């Protein structure tokens, strides 16, 4: 099962992806997580990505497409994968198509998580992450039980200024992809403003019938 999770920053892609990983046993491929891991490891890729990410801008396509191509060729993608945060430009979508053609794979569904802008800001500024487990929390909606045990931190780009740039990048560069995939008859829109479990239920209903 090859899935793209699509949605604005803070729409809940990471939260839902982790639940789908558990359910289907296929990997989550999050370009944002891959860049953050590269930054934590101090690699050249990380240094390059950081200059864009901290401001909330997209990392250049050539860099991003390269890491996804490498990741999709790995053996654990054999049963399927969940792309989270990729593609994000029309060029990335076209290049993804070429990569999948070479691998003999196709995208089965593009799951769009639909959330309003006003909710996005609250979700993102309240998000906390665990360095230890990679779990995603929210100070109000899903607080960690033990902050020290979980080694909780806040993402560098989860501030109001960067969020505004991220939303602008989403509207200008990423949202045109919605029509691209709609025209291919692959999209399903899920109401992302519901409780986490209800959203998962709606997604599973679609994916289980594939
Ligand atoms: P990335 O890490 O992908 O960030 P993003 O797209 O901005 O999305 P987020 O991770 O902020 O949100 P999410 O949808 O995963 O929401 P989450 O589940 O965490 O990218 C970061 C940066 O990397 C980009 O800005 C760019 O620079 C670069 N990058 C990455 N991919 C790229 C690409 N393809 N091309 C170029 N550059 C790229 O949830 C958010 C919060 O809400 C959490 O606190 C969560 O607990 C809470 N929450 C989730 N669901 C609910 C719910 N139903 N109700 C209440 N709260 C909820
Ligand atoms: Zn995410």
Image (cartoon, rainbow, N blue to C red):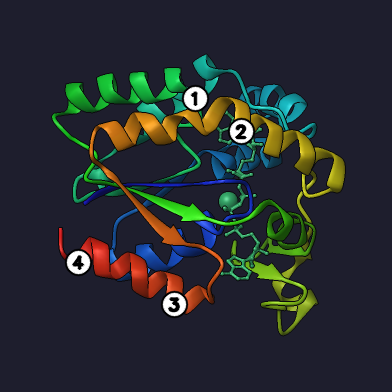
Please tell me the numbered disc located at residue 208: 4
The Cα atoms of the two marked residues, 4 and 2, are separated by 30 Å
Of the numbered discs 3 and 1, the one sitting upstream in the chain is: 1
Of the numbered discs 3 and 2, the one sitting upstream in the chain is: 2
Q: Are marks 3 and 2 in contact (CB under 8 Å)?
A: no
**Quarter of the image holding residue 105?**
top left
Say which residue label 3 marks. Answer: 198
Front tag of 3 and 2? 2
- 140 over 112 or under it: above or below: below
Of the numbered discs 4 and 1, the one sitting upstream in the chain is: 1
Of the numbered discs 4 and 3, the one sitting upstream in the chain is: 3
Quadrant location of the C terminus in the rendered image: bottom left
Residue projecting furthest to the bottom = 145
Say which residue label 2 marks. Answer: 171
**Quarter of the image holding residue 116?**
bottom right
Name the spot of residue 176 as percent of width and height, x first. 48, 28
């Amino acid at each position: 099962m090859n899935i793209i999770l699509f949605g604005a920053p803070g729409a809940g892609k990471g939260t839902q992806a982790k639940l789908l990983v558990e359910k289907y046993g296929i990997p989550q491929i999050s370009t944002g997580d891959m860049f953050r891991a590269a930054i934590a490891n101090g690699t050249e890729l990380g240094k390059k990505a950081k200059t864009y990410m901290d401001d909330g801008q997209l990392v250049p396509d050539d860099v991003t497409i390269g890491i996804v191509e490498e990741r999709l060729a790995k053996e654990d993608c054999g049963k399927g994968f969940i792309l989270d945060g990729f593609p994000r430009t029309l060029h990335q979508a076209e290049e993804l198509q070429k990569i999948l053609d070479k691998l003999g794979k196709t995208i089965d569904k593009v799951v769009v998580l639909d959330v309003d802008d006003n909710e996005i800001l609250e979700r993102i500024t309240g998000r906390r992450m665990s360095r230890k487990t990679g779990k995603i929390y929210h100070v109000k909606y899903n607080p960690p039980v033990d902050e020290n045990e979980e080694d909780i931190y806040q993402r560098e780009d989860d501030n109001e200024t960067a969020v505004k740039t991220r939303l602008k990048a989403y509207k200008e560069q990423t949202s045109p992809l919605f029509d691209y995939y709609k025209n291919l008859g692959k999209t399903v829109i899920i109401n992302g403003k519901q409780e986490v479990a209800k959203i998962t239920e709606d997604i599973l209903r679609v994916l289980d019938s594939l």
